[in-house]
Amino acid sequence: MLWVLGPRPFRNWNPLRFAHIEPVSRRHFQPLSCIDWREGTVSHTAYELRCRECGKGYGNQPLSICEDCFSPLEVDFDLEYARSRFTREAITAGPLNMWRYKALLPVAENYVPQTPAGLTPLLEAPRLGARIGAKNLYIKNDAVCLPTLSFKDRVVAVALANAQAFGFDTVGCSSTGNLANAVAAGAARLGLKTYILVPADLEPAKILNTQVYGATLIRIDGNYDHCNRLCSQIAEKYNWGFVNVNLRPYYAEGSKTVGFEIAEQLGWRLPDNVVVPMAGGSLITKIKKAFRELVALGLVADKPVKFFGAQATGCSPISTAVRSGADAIEPQRPNTIARSLAIGNPADGSYAIRVIRDSGGWAEDVSDVEIVSAIQELAETEGVFTETAGGVTTAVTARLYAHGRIKPDELTVSCITGNGLKTTDVLQGAYTQEQTVRPRLSDFAAYLEEQQGTFAEVA
C-alpha cells in the first residue's frame, strides 16, 4: 500500500465526509491523482476530486463530500492532458470492453484492469419502433453486461480499482440489487472481503446472485435509504471502502462509458435523444458528461442532445420534480416492483433535473402494470429480456413518442440497464403452462389444430 506524503494533515474530520483512512505511523498523506500502486510511482496529475458547487479541489482520497459547502465531489479531468491519449485510434486499438476508454477513467495510466465489463450492443429496434411510432430507435443493451448482467458492472470496476489504490481490503455497498451483484462478483475476482446491505424485500434472484460470490449479505429491515445511511456510518467506523459512499466520485465515473460507447457505436456521432432510467440520478448526468468530454476533445461534432428520465410511479422523486417545475427533490417512500430504481431520496436528483431541463428533455413515470407490459413488449419485438428498470425505460420511451416529446425520425437511444432473469417474479402467472403432448406426429397435429382454432376464435 502506497501513501504519498504531503502537507495537508487529517484534522477536524467532519462526519459528513463518510469515511477516511487513518494516517500511517502518525504521518500525514495526500494521495495524488495517477498513482501506480503496484510500482510505487507517481505520474502526471490527470484528475482530481473537486466540489461540484464551490469548485474546491481535494486531490484524490476516499471522500465524497466537500468540507466547506457539503456538496458532492466529482472527478475533474485535465482534458488537455488526455487529448493525445484519448483518440479514436487509441480507443480502437484498446481492449474490447470499457477499458478502451481508460484514459478518461480515474485510474493510473499503467493500471492493468482485472474486471472486464462494458462494450455492450447498441441494437436497432425497428419492430418495437413500429409499435410505438419510432423510425430511428436504438436499444443500448446492458442486460448482457459482464459479469453480472447490468450496467453496475461498469461503475464497480472503476470503484474497486480505486479501493485497491487506497489500500482497502474490505469493500461494500448499499444496494437495490444490481450493485450488490456487481460488487460481490468484482470483489471475489480481486480477493477483497465484502459486506453488502440490501432492503429485506429485495428480489430473491438478486439475493442469490450476491451470495453465490461469497459476499456477506445483510438484509436490512428498511428501504434503500436506510441501508445507505447505515453504510455511511459503517464506512466511518471501520475504514472500509464503500463503492457508493466514500468511493462514490470514482464509482460514478464508470457510467461515462455508456455514453462513450453510444457515440462510438453510432460512428462517432451523438444521438438526438437518450432515455435513461433513474434511481440515484447519476447515470443520466454521466452520459451527459461523456458527451461533453467527447465534444471538448474533438471526437464528435457538437449538437443538441435531449435527455429524458424514466422512473416508476411508485418511486418518482425526480420525474415528479421535473413535471411540477420544482428545483428540489421531495423524498418519497418507495412502493414499486421496480426495486432497482426504488431510491426515494436520490443523491444526484438535483443534478439529474438540471441535465434534463438544460437539454430541453423531460421526465415521466409509469405504473407497475405498464412496466410488466413493457418488459413483455421489448422481449416479443426485439428479443431483449429486461428487468423491471428496463420495463420502466421502455414504457416511458413509448409514452414520449405518444405525447410528441420525441419525433418519429429523431435518432433515439433507450438505455436498458439490467437483465430480466433477475426479476422473473414480476411475471409470475403471466404465462400458462401448456398441456403435455405425447411424442407422436398425430398428437402434435391435433395440438396444432386446437391451438389454431383457439387463435381464430380470439381473432
Image (cartoon, rainbow, N blue to C red):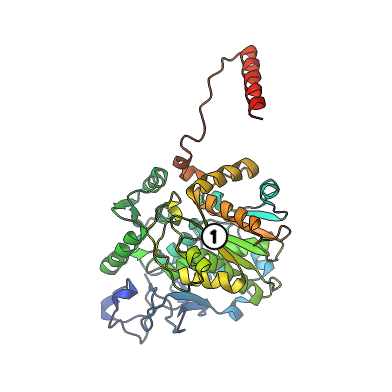
Q: Position of residue 409 (x, y in %)?
A: 74, 59
Using residue 435 as the reference point, say whether residue 242 is left or right of it.
Answer: left
Using residue 294 as the reference point, say whether residue 162 is left or right of it.
Answer: left
- How many marks the image carries: the answer is 1
Using residue 34 as the reference point, say whether residue 19 is left or right of it.
Answer: left
Using residue 79 as the reference point, say whether residue 114 is left or right of it.
Answer: left
Pick the front one: 273 or 107: 273
Question: Image quadrant of residue 448?
Answer: top right
Pick the front one: 382 or 332: 332
Question: Image quadrant of residue 73?
Answer: bottom left
Q: Position of residue 136 (x, y in %)?
A: 71, 56
Task: Report the residue that reaches farthest toward the bottom.
Answer: 7
Q: Is residue 65 above or below residue 238?
A: below
Pick the front one: 171 or 409: 409
Question: Image quadrant of residue 87?
Answer: bottom right
Q: Quadrant of the N terminus?
A: bottom left
Give SS at disc 1: strand
Q: Residues within 10 Å of mark 1 (few under 14, many from 20)?
A: many
Q: Please name the amino acid that badge 1 sits on.
A: Glu
Q: Which residue is mark 1?
A: 364
Q: Is residue 111 visible?
A: no
Q: Quadrant of the C terminus?
A: top right
Q: Position of residue 338 (x, y in %)?
A: 46, 51
Q: Is residue 334 visible?
A: yes
Q: Position of residue 212 (x, y in %)?
A: 38, 45
Q: Is residue 59 above or below residue 113?
A: below
Which residue appears at 48% of the width and 61% of the height? 155
